[in-house]
Each structure stands twice: as structure tokens, then as C-alpha cells.
Image (spheres, rainbow, N blue to C red):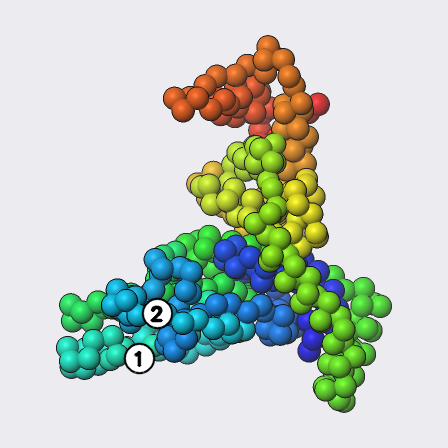
Amino acid sequence: MPFTAVVGLDSLKIALILNGINPRIGGVLISGQKGTGKTTVVRAFADLLPEVDVIAECRFGCNPSRTDLLCPECRAKQDGGLHLSSKRRKMRVVNLPLSISEDRLIGSLDLQRVLQDGIQALKPGILAEANQNVLYVDEVNLLPDHLVDDLLDAAATKVNVIEREGISIAHPSDFILVGTMNPEEGELRPQLLDRFPLHVAVGRSHSVEDRMELVERNLAYERDPQAFAESWSRAQSDLREKIVRAREALNKVALPESGLRAIAMACDALEVDGVRPDIIISKTAITHAAFEGRLEVTAEDMRLAAQLTLSHRTRRGGLLEPPTPQDIDQAILRAAEVAQKQDRRKSPSEVPEDKDKSGRRFSGGRFGRQDRFADSGLADGKKKLPEK
């Protein structure tokens, strides 16, 4: 099924597209009941994945521009003065089945051959195949705990380490993590939940007309898949070109200081745990601006990024439920408004300022670090942004 032919699921499609443009976002978790099209969209997205640079003949798909993440084979060649030729290949979706063994996931070693041949004795696993690709885990909430731990280690460090009998071999494993889950079948461990940068909850919100259109396209696809794909080839090509243009413009997009301040204010007001959400919102907002052809992040970019980033985040050490969409919209838009007003103020007396040791100025006003909405009060366990 062509990606552009999928009916509805706009939030899910934009989340996948943004990861395709900027793999450094890191992935997305898709939650929803059975039959909502989660797996269909992910498989369809494979056709739109861009090309990446890899070192030719490398078993682990090393990125020639990331010398800090070279496998032992490529590093040995580089240290020996050999030229590492590169080529381009298309990213792909690597499936991780629930029945997988630990050796198949992280790789296996023939200890006798390790002593004789070194790295050549390593049999790569799924985490090696996933390097510079998309790692797709269907029903990720049902994955055994010991495999979840291996997956978390690789996702956090971008390196997979195989240790057997005191022998340790590492190789790069930098992937986009995409998982699907049905909440009816069990919750996801908080440690793994936090590793998914973005989250989309897929509901049954199709209108009658959408359901009719979905059935018509499905029947047309089953009658003649090739003809159906050709009828959507123009839309697919246009979207691919838009993704390529966005990737080229990504480093040119600016996140103004007022936008950065607004993101920090909103996350502080919502009391989300850690600073990872601030970083992910910033990356996602920049990427969305590039996708829309803008060279500066707007409040709408930040709002969409915040919705995708914060809907599954724990707050106040896990004591509060994730914020609602209304809470997120109110926080980010109000914070953006206040941040812009602070930037427009030219009189130092209007906004008390101080300097840290580096000489950088920071605000000591109502949104300052010293006063985290102390006078705004709490209602229903959630902090409120101050009214105008």
C-alpha cells in the first residue's frame, strides 16, 4: 500500500516523515487498538526512506562521516592508512520478531575463531542490520525484559556490545526505533517508554466517508496492486522530493532564542521529567519547519512537536499522568507568547536580569528558574500558566 494512499492517520504519518528527514530524532511509538492501520503505515513508509552513506563492503553499514562509530574492521583499515570507500544505499525497515533469541538480536561469537580471526568470528545480529536503518518492533510491549534491556543499551549508546567469556566486541548500532503496541495487551516499561522520542495514539476516529474511502482503496489495491501503485506514483514521488529538500535545508533552519525559551518554559510548567523532552521538541520543531519549507521555527512547529513529544511523558517523578493535548497546547502557545514579549522588551528595568559566570544573561521574571509559577497555583495536579 503506497504511503500517500493511506486514509487519515495524519499525526502518525507526519511523525514517520519527520524521522525520515531527521533520523537524529530517534523514532516513534505507535499505540492503538487492533485494526487501526499501525503496521500498514510503517510498512508503507519504507518506500519513502531516503538514502544514506555507508562504507563499502562493511558488514555493519558504518557511516563514513561518523568516525567515532566505526566498527573494529573499519577502524583497523583507517588506522592502517587504507582508504575507506563509500557508497549510497536506501534505508530499510528491519523487523524484530517477538520470538527472537538474544544471540540473534545482539549477535553471536565463535570463541575459538575469535582468538584466531578476531572480529571476523562475529556473526552479526539484528542490531547490526539495524545500523542506519529503521528498527521496527511490532507489539513492543510484549518483548521479553532481557531483550528490552539489550535494546535499551543499544538505543542509548548507539553501540552494540557483545561479551562472551571475557571477550568484548563492539560495533555501531545507530537506528530509528519504531514500535507499535496495543494498550489492551499490557503497558510498556517506563524505561523503554522514555526511549521513544515521539508518540502517536491511533484511535478509531474515521468518519463514515473515510471508512468508505479506505475500503474502496483497499479493494482497488487487492484487485491490481501494480496499477494501484502506479496511480499513486506521482504523489509518492512528490513526497520523496519534499523529504529530500527538507533534509538539505535542515541545517539552515534557525530556532530563535525566544522559541528555545518557550520550549523550556512549557516543559517546566508541565513538570515533565528530565530534559530529554526539551531536546526532542527542539529537533522535531526544526525538522517540521524544514519540511514546510521555512527557515525559522514558528509557534505552530513547536506546538506540533510538543504534542508528539509529551503525550507519553511521565511528570513530577511519575506522580502525574502525561499531559493532555489541551494542556500541551495551552502551555506551549502561552509560553511562546510570553517569550516573544520578553524578547521585545528593550528596557532592562522591565525584566530583571542577572548574569551567570559565563556572562550570559537570563531572566529572573515570572518564568525565571527562581520562580517556577509559584503564584500560579495547582489545579487537578497540573501547573497552570499565568493568565495575561
Residue pictured at 40% horizontal, 24% vertical: 358
x and y percent of residue 343 in the render?
63, 25
Quadrant (top left/top right/bottom left/bottom right) for the C terminus: top right
Left or right: where does residue 198 sit relative to residue 101? right
Residue pictured at 49% horizontal, 75% vertical: 95
Q: Which residue is mark 1?
A: 123
Residue 169 location, quadrant: bottom left
- Residue 152, visible in the rendered structure: no
Residue pictured at 59% horizontal, 69% vertical: 49
Quadrant (top left/top right/bottom left/bottom right) for the N terminus: bottom right
Q: Nearer the viewer, residue 121 or 388?
A: 121
Q: Nearer the viewer, residue 320 or 63?
A: 63
Badge number at residue 298: none
Q: Dot 2: within a 10 Å radius of its alpha carbon, few (fewer than 14), some, or many (20 or more) residues?
A: few
Q: Nearer the viewer, residue 286 or 125?
A: 286
Left or right: where does residue 46 sit relative to residue 59? right
- Name which residue type carries label 1: Lys
Q: What's the distance in space between the residues labelled 2 and 1, CA to CA?
A: 25 Å
Q: How many marks?
A: 2
- Identify the element where label 2 is drawn: loop
On screen, residue 269 above or below 6: above
- Name which residue type carries label 2: His
Badge number at residue 83: 2
Residue at the limit of the structure toward the top, as seen here? 349
Residue pictured at 54% horizontal, 35% vertical: 264
**First-in-chain label (2 vs 1):** 2
- Residue 172, visible in the rendered structure: yes
